[in-house]
Amino acid sequence: KPLTSGDYECCRFINCDFFKSDFTGISFIDCHFENCNLSMVMMAKTILRDVKFLNCKMLGIHFENCNQFGLTPYFENCNLSHSSFYQVKLKKTVFKNSNVQEVDFTETDLSNSIFNKCDLANAKFENTILEKADLRTAFNYSIDPEANHIKKAKFSLSGIRGLLYKYDVDIESDTGF
């Protein structure tokens, strides 16, 4: 059954299949989505305040269409591949153990956000604000420091390739010489 339009507060959605559902104008406040399929959901003017997504499939969602006021999602063990956060303010957002492949973060504000053990293969970072973001355990990212704002962002030494990819240099581990 599709969700009826309205406000959902302190609700839990468990094992729901919302594939290609229309969440236009629906408000979710302090809600949890667990083990749900939200792929291709339409989110025009959708409100997501303090919403947790746990173990969810969320392919191809355009989060830029959400109501941006108070947008505070949390993602854990989710597949967000092919989704878009174009020009979205996502300060202090947590992405934990998630597949974030081919996600568009162009002009997104990810200040103080955390990418904990996330696969960022082919994610698009252009004019993205990553100030004080934590990517120490993220992997497969390609971020151009000259085309993004990365002041005081945290990266691991093993992830240095993702910052230097455009220079086509070979980076090898220390051989002890």
Image: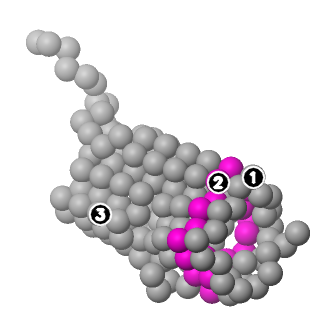
Q: Is residue 4 left or right of residue 54?
A: right
Do the numbered discs 3 and 1 sit on residues whose CB atoms are within 8 Å?
A: no
Mark 1 or 2, nearer chain start: 1
Mark 1 near mark 2, Cβ–Cβ under 8 Å?
yes
- Dominant secondary structure (helix, strand or loop) of the stretch shown in magenta: loop
Specify which label sits upstream in the sequence, 2 or 3: 2
Residue at the far front in the pictured view? 10
* Quarter holding residue 93: bottom left
- Answer yes or no: is residue 146 visible: no
**Mark 3: which secondary structure?**
loop
Q: Amino acid at mark 2?
A: Glu
Q: Which residues are magenta?
A: 27-47
The label number, if any, that marks residue 112 in the structure image: 3
Identify the secondary structure beneath mark 1. Answer: loop
According to the picture, the residue beneath numbered tag 1 turns out to be: 15
Q: Viewed as shown, does residue 146 lie left or right of 15?
A: left
Disc 2 target residue: 34
Which amino acid, mark 1? Asn
> Are the residues tagged 2 and 3 within 8 Å (C-beta)?
no
- Would residue 1 appear left or right of 22 to someone viewing this image? right
Residue 169 screen position, x and y as percent: 31, 37
56 inside magenta stretch: no
**Camera-nearest residue between 131 and 143:** 131
Give whichever of 115, 108 is nearer the camera: 115
Report if residue 70 is visible in the image.
yes
Residue 90 picture location, percent across and down = 42, 71
Q: Nearest the camera: 174 or 65?
A: 65
